[in-house]
Image: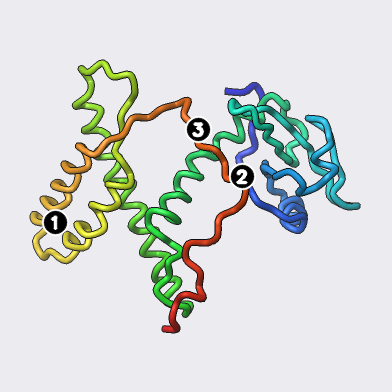
Amino acid sequence: MIGEKIPTNLTVVRFLEVPLIQYLNQTGLHFLMRVRRKWNLDVDVAPSDSLIKLDMNTTVRVVKFDLPSGEQETLITNLFEVSADAFPTLYFYRWPIEVKFDLVKNKLELENFSGRTKNAVLQDFWTCMHLANIAAIANDEANELVQEQRTEKSNKYVYTPNMNQLIGLLKDAYIDAVFMHSKHKRRKRMEAVIAQIVYAIVPIRPSRSIPRPLSPQNAKFHHNHKSNC
């Protein structure tokens, strides 16, 4: 991929404050972060691959590059020995993490807690993580069948299961399967779900991009909307 060896203790995040950077430096963690315009005026005007002092004890490296959309991406990092040319590729490795966050926050609605108590939040959190793992397994199994079925077809794009429909099918079917006393019936129920998922597919378009919102959206699920439990 890149000539330099990339540290394994790399932390990739998107939104930050200086105390977080100080904490990562103090604990010996490497980071690569995207910053928005006006987060720091010195960073905004700094040329690409330059060093900026955020305070007396905190120095970061600023790296900038242009996206295919024409927008300029600004990154800051404490990786001082890595070539600047490596950062665009390195930063885009965050994408699988972004996809997982989208799954648990938007599709499984992790933040839609059923109560305010510690027990309710932990229960909802671990239930969501369990379903996310089940969804990943179901997606892998369905994807294998999809690729087998499309081996002889000359499509422009590679097709993959539609995660939205997969989640919709699993939400009810998985609960039904869990409460079935027969192992054979549980297996048949899940196999039926996988068979349905195989027909709910979408193309992967490598060059497709979605415009980034100019302002952050309000949280979908605010804790004030929840009743005490």
Q: Is residue 163 left or right of residue 64?
A: left
Q: Is residue 187 left or right of residue 8?
A: left
Q: Amino acid at mark 1?
A: Arg
Q: Residue furthest bottom?
A: 228
Q: Position of residue 220 (x, y in %)?
A: 48, 62
* Badge 2 or badge 3: first in the primary sequence: 2
Residue receiving disc 2: 12
Q: Secondary structure under badge 3?
A: loop
Task: Tell me which residue sits at (45%, 83%) in the image.
Answer: 228
The image's colour scheme reads rainbow
* Res 4 quadrant in image: top right
Residue receiving disc 1: 186
Q: Quadrant of the N terminus?
A: top right
Residue 146's label in the rendered image is none
**Cα–Cα gap, marks 2 and 1:** 39 Å
**Cα–Cα gap, marks 1 and 3:** 39 Å
Q: Quadrant of the C terminus?
A: bottom left
60 or 216: nearer the eye?
216
Q: Amino acid at mark 3?
A: Ser
**Cα–Cα gap, marks 2 and 3:** 21 Å
Q: For marks 2 and 3, give the one nearer the viewer.
A: 3
Task: Tell me which residue sits at (76%, 58%) in the image.
Answer: 19
Q: Position of residue 202 (x, y in %)?
A: 31, 34
Q: Secondary structure under badge 1?
A: helix
Residue receiving disc 3: 209
Mark 1 nearby-residue class (10 Å; few <14, some 14–19, many ≥20): some
Task: Tell me which residue sits at (19%, 57%) in the image.
Answer: 173
Q: Is residue 137 left or right of residue 191?
A: right
Q: Amino acid at mark 2?
A: Val
